[in-house]
Image (spheres, coloured by chain):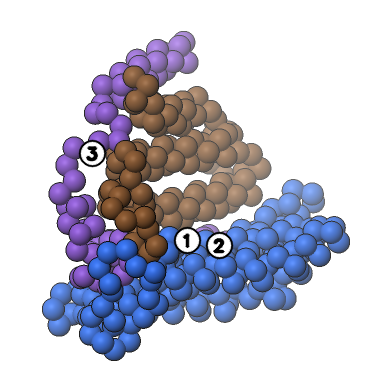
Chain colours: A brown, B purple, C blue
Amino acid sequence: MIGNLPYVAVVIFIGLGIYTLMFKKNLIKIAIGVVLIENGVNLFLITLGYRKGAIAPIYTQAPSGQAMVLPTPQALTLTSIVIGIATTALILSVAMMIYKHYGTLDTDEVRRLKG
Amino acid sequence: MKKIIFGIAFLIFFSFLIVSAINMRTFGEPAYSEMDDYFIENAQSETGANNVVTSVVFDYRGFDTLGEATVLFTAVVGVIALFRGVKK
Amino acid sequence: MKEMSRIVKTVTNFVYGFIIIFGFYIIAHGHLTPGGGFQGGAVVGSAFALLLVSYGSLNSQKFLKKDILSLFEGFGLILFIVLGFSGLGITFFYNFLANSGGWFGNAAVIGVNPGNMNTGGVIPLMNIAVGLEVLSAFGVIVLTMASAAEFTKKKEKS
């Protein structure tokens, strides 16, 4: 149980994100929920690649003879973070345009059609 | 009423997530690591870079990085096109 | 976005050059130390955001030009694609400069070593290309959203 605490942290991140997506009506809060789920998935990838007592996989002036952490999940997380930033910028831009057109951020009031 | 049903569904889902997190393999001991051991062993002789993560990003999985750069470019184009009609 | 007080502007004048140089250091040493194109580009983009917040969006358009940044972004992406296609004699994204003896072509010492700048083949060039693209993308996103927020606030008041 106590050894699996990082997985529990991942689950709490993703659960809080899904709770925000299900119960909140504000568009900014929905964006915060999406970012929470993203951070949970990134933490999950990093957690899967960890090796106990190992160092980062970089040979420049490293202590010799140590085991190294798996490099592939870190590379995938690196690309995932930048994609997350790009999609977050796009989500916030669309929220700004919705606020400019409708004057509100509540998703229940945005439903009405307006030119 | 709708909120209560959603809350019950969310609680069931969250408890399943917690149980699966506790039952996962122990933290810190990867099950399969043959590919990553190959990268750690051979990255210096094959690509000449000391940083194994950078050699995975730009050499072994360069096509992935190309798609990622394209996604970033598309997001910037989308933001600019969304605010195109907005004049100060 | 209005400009902030004189204390903030003075500290910004001290700090932003160091932040930009640290970002370019991370980009250039991406194949030796922790870092690379994405991380260094994000650091330089945070320097742009600092300038924008402290000087306000109207004043900062005098020294942060959106057109030049978008030009850099296209240049970075095209450089990356050209570097990917140049290894096409063998495979796509083949590292054709590694261990060749030319540019960035020295063979690395196997095992723990203090690091040699002239290794890595095509990886440092790709770091520079991706770093240019990421820093200009962040700059363009921040500048565009700041000017659009100005417009939204003005319409709300009227």
**Do the residues marked 3 and 2 share a common chain?**
no
Chain containing the residue with disc 2 = C
Q: Position of residue C76 (x, y in %)?
A: 43, 76
* Whether residue C57 is situated above or below residue A29 in the rendered picture: below
Residue with the mark numbered 2 = C43
* Whether residue A5 is situated above or below residue A56 in the rendered picture: above
The quadrant holding residue A107 is top right
What residue type is disc 1 on?
Gln
User: What's the distance in space between the residues labelled 3 and 1, CA to CA?
Assistant: 27 Å
Residue at screen point 19% across, 63% down: B42
**Do the residues marked 3 and 1 share a common chain?**
no
Tag 1–tag 2 contact (CB < 8 Å): yes
The quadrant holding residue A83 is bottom left
Q: Position of residue B41 (x, y in %)?
A: 20, 59
User: What's the distance in space between the residues labelled 1 and 2, CA to CA?
Assistant: 6 Å
Residue with the mark numbered 1 = C39
Residue with the mark numbered 3 = B30
The answer to whether residue B77 of the structure is visible from this angle is no
Residue mark closest to the camera, 3 vs 1: 3
A23 vs B56, left or right, is: right
User: What's the distance in space between the residues labelled 3 and 2, CA to CA?
Assistant: 32 Å
The quadrant holding residue C30 is bottom left
C85 vs B81, left or right, is: left
* Whether residue A80 is situated above or below residue C86 in the rendered picture: above
- Where the N terminus of chain C falls, by quadrant? bottom right
